[in-house]
Image: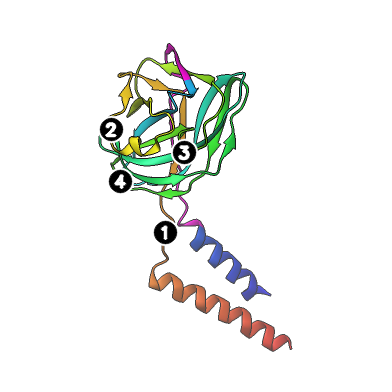
Amino acid sequence: MIKTILRAVLVGSLIAGAAHASTLIDSTGGPSGGFATPFGSPDTSTYGQTFVTGATDTVLDSFTMFLSGSAALNLRGYVGAWNGSTMTSLLYTSATVAGPTGTNSPVTFAPHLQLLANTPYVAFLSISQLAAQPAAAYAMNVVSDTINGGFVFSNNGTNFIQLTGGSWGNLAPADIWFRASLSAPAAVPEPGSLALIGLALLGGVAVRRRKT
């Protein structure tokens, strides 16, 4: 019994050693800069927020954008690499979701996406990869300063390819309400740690054999 308890403590401590506090990017508390509108159908179909990763927290666990409106649209969340004026490659596409109705309603996605350190990216909402929808629009809160990126948009209609082939518009320096959680990649146990885990497990097997 004692060896079994020690095994649990040892394995638990090794796993806990790999834990790391996450980084939160949050522009929702900044000074108000009015509203960005209209986001929706048929023209301004893409609204996004650029951000820059840190040196260690490079896994994008989730991101949230906030919509205000009364006529819901279907939409998707995306993440792409960013070069300062356009998306250079698409890295994440969510399933299609129904946009909310109400004021400052959060729309959250959980890509769990491994990114590069100290690198710019864009997280965005778009309806342009979906079939044409009836005219409808959302507004988004604007913050009049920037976190580490800025609010960007594209009047690309249903032409999704334009997002990687043309410059996006911006309201610099400004953000939209945006929240993202990043964490460090899961640590790979050192060979010595793996050996300790193996010995602990073998100790548990030996205890069970003696009981038998």
- Measured in 3D between alpha carbons, the distance from the residue under mark 2 to the one under mark 4, in whole angstroms, is 25 Å
Q: Residue at x 44, y 56 (%)?
A: 186
The residue closer to the viewer here, 26 or 190, is 26
Give the amino acid type for the residue marked by disc 1 in the picture. Answer: Ala
Q: Residues within 10 Å of mark 4 (few under 14, many from 20)?
A: some
- Measured in 3D between alpha carbons, the distance from the residue under mark 2 to the one under mark 1, in whole angstroms, is 38 Å
User: Which of marks 4 and 2 precedes in the sequence?
Assistant: 4
Q: Which residue is mark 3?
A: 129
Magenta-colored span: 16-38
User: Which of marks 2 and 3 precedes in the sequence?
Assistant: 3
Give the amino acid type for the residue marked by disc 4 in the picture. Answer: Ala
Give the number of the disc on residue 166. Answer: 2
Residue 33 is covered by the magenta coloring: yes
The residue closer to the viewer here, 112 or 159, is 159
- Measured in 3D between alpha carbons, the distance from the residue under mark 1 to the one under mark 4, in whole angstroms, is 16 Å
Give the number of the disc on residue 92. Answer: none
Give residue 74's position: percent from left, percent from top. Answer: 57, 33
Q: Which residue is mark 4?
A: 117
